[in-house]
Image (spheres, rainbow, N blue to C red):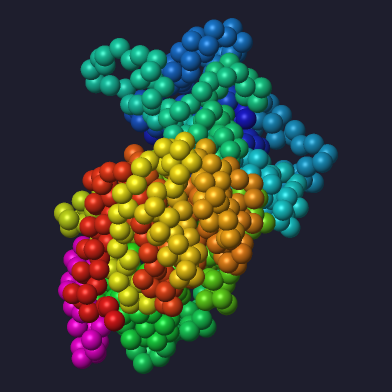
Amino acid sequence: MQVALYTIKHAREWSIHISLDLRVDLIWWTALAKREQRSEQIWLISTGIPLGWALQCCSYLMTLDRTSMQQNTWGDYIHRALMDVYHNSLVSGKSNSDQNHQSTRGTWDLLWDVYNSWTAAGYYILSSWEENQLPGDPGSSLWKRQLSREAAYISKALSGRSLLWNECIAMMQDSDYVEHNLKSSLQLAYLNQQISLLSAVYRPARPKPKRPLPFRTAASRAAEVRCRRCGSHHIRYTSCASCGSAACGYCEDCLTLGRSRECGLLLQGNFSDPYDIQPVQVHANELPTASNTLRRGSDSSYIKAYNPEVIRQRWGLSPAQTAAAYQALLFLGRSVPAACNQNTTITRKLSAARNIASSLNKERFLLWAVTGAGKTEMVFPLLEHAIRTGGRAVIATPRRDVVLELAPRLAKAFPDIDIAVLYGGSEDRWRTASLTISTTHQLMRFHEAFELVIIDEIDAFPYHNNPMLSYAANQACRPNGKFIYLSATPSADLQQEIKRGTLAHAKVPVRYHRHPLPVPKHLKVPSLSRCITNKHLPNSLQSQIHQSINRGAQIFLFVPRIAWIEATIELIRKYFPHIHIEGTSSQDHDRAEKVSLFRQQQIRLLVTTTILERGVTIPKSDVYIMDANDKLYDSAALIQMAGRAGRSMNDPAGGVFFASRDWTLEQKRAVNQIKQMNRTARRQGYLQ
């Protein structure tokens, strides 16, 4: 995209600006100058400069002293601002095709000054309306009113959003907006500081150094360039027909969401509350319901009304769930209720928790809950708190199937709250709602939209060790917003933060049914590849699987390699021909159907990879992990797979078996963590 670049000479200094429609800027600035009796001149630099170049000029020149600048030196300043652009053109070998920068070095046109009004060049720009654009004289009141209405509509639609130009067009087409001139409306909203016009890929401005810097290589220059949408530095340069540049950078990491280019327009809406929320008083003895709403800032009174007993009664939580949810509420509210019933068992156990939550007051909070603890139910009070105090909340999870599973549960829990469900191809992609359920990738389309961001399964692929998704989550959160992390197996870094006291957290060491976690047992067997080669299943493994079948359990049998699934199925069918055995993996197109049949007990034994280590609950199941000593399995993966057993109240002691030749450190760590959680639950009185 190409834009106009112009400067304004004020009484004491110069300023530089970009425009999608220069006619809007001329009318806006001249009206402002006449109204405030300013002494100004407007000079045109270029009407067709690539967006990335124009913004780089603005960013660079804003770091300089503009009080002593002269009109005849502006070309030199702009040339310095674009040195990296010229360098990339030379490296591409196509510098002769790049003529855009020539327009920034030539003669500039004076468009308007406060004494002589419009020049011939300025009048020509204002009179360039086409028949299919807004009717009437550009300076007329009708034009101004119509454009103002459209700008207000667009700025509201973009509130909390971060969209590329094509995405903005798609959003407007899906709405009831009648387009006259989208660029004109966006430019007016930008001048009114309701939205930001940015380049999707940008170079941070560097002020002029006081002393010479060492030679900067091409690699060091490339490392500075960044995608504004996903934060990546993996930028590739190609010729661009849109802006005419021979070396226009685009991001390679977020291509699946549309091409983010250096000349590509990224629109970010400045946050505004789209809801007119009326205050409702909540008394200490009143149970919060879906009809209670409060304005933002009423956190204290809301927390006072929402004590542990209310949480337990309203959401039917266990004591451990109630304690963790209340600690998280204290973190969100940043205050401790003065009036609490100190005689309740739950409140006595929370005395230390209040001190932790009130003293740390960090922007992040970790809910460390064992597998099957009911993490979703624990965030219900947090979501209600964020929404009823006037904010917006999002639950982001790495996988689409989890989003689809959470949507009906949250709709049932919050029947009177608008909910948007976002994933690739979702019909709700442009919908603004109080509560959003989203895949983590969809967070890239938001900017400072949510007061509360809940990241589910923070340790899972693809969020774990993914700077792009972490960047997107941070961009989606308001500057004064809060993060809640959910995990059964937090990373070593998070656990170190807990030990140092720099991460507020609550630990839920027991499942909702209040029975201890099944402790894995070791089965010493040969490697799975050897068993497949010899076509023989060890007697100890045969015997244990027979016991699982005889007790009526369904069986998860995890293998570390997709290529071994079919051979493992054939081997097990040889010994257990009377039961239905299937296999699935990430490459299986029928995975959803097989998982559904497994849930319906039509499949008795399912051979699978770690693709099913999360999100699948079978009421009565045993877990077998083949080659548990494989390097693919760390302690977190082993704990997650073991967490498929014992999740039901009717079968809390399901069996977990680590089948391997060796007893490795990761297996020991997994067992020790499970035992430690059981000891903690027993010590705190949570076990039945």
Total number of numbered discs in the rendering: 0
Relative to 509, does residue 183 appear above or below in the rendering?
A: above
Give the x, y percent position of residue 195: 53, 48
- Which residue is depicted at the point 33% across and 15% down? 216
Residue at 26%, 47% (x, y): give it.
663
Q: Residue at x 58, y 24 (%)?
A: 49
Taking the magenta stretch, the answer to whether it contains residue 314 is no
Question: Does residue 391 lie above or below 668 as drawn?
Answer: below
Span highlighted in magenta in the image:
337-361
Residue located at (48% from left, 18% from top) = 85
Q: Nearer the viewer, residue 497 or 265?
A: 497
Q: x, y percentage for residue 175?
A: 71, 56
Q: Is residue 342 magenta?
A: yes
Residue 453 sits in quarter: bottom left
Quadrant including the N terminus = top right
In the image, residue 2 lies at what x, y percent?
A: 62, 28
Q: Main secondary structure of the magenta part?
A: helix
User: Which of the two residues, 74 or 314, is positioned nearer the viewer here?
Assistant: 314
- Could you tell me residue 655's position as x and y percent? 37, 64
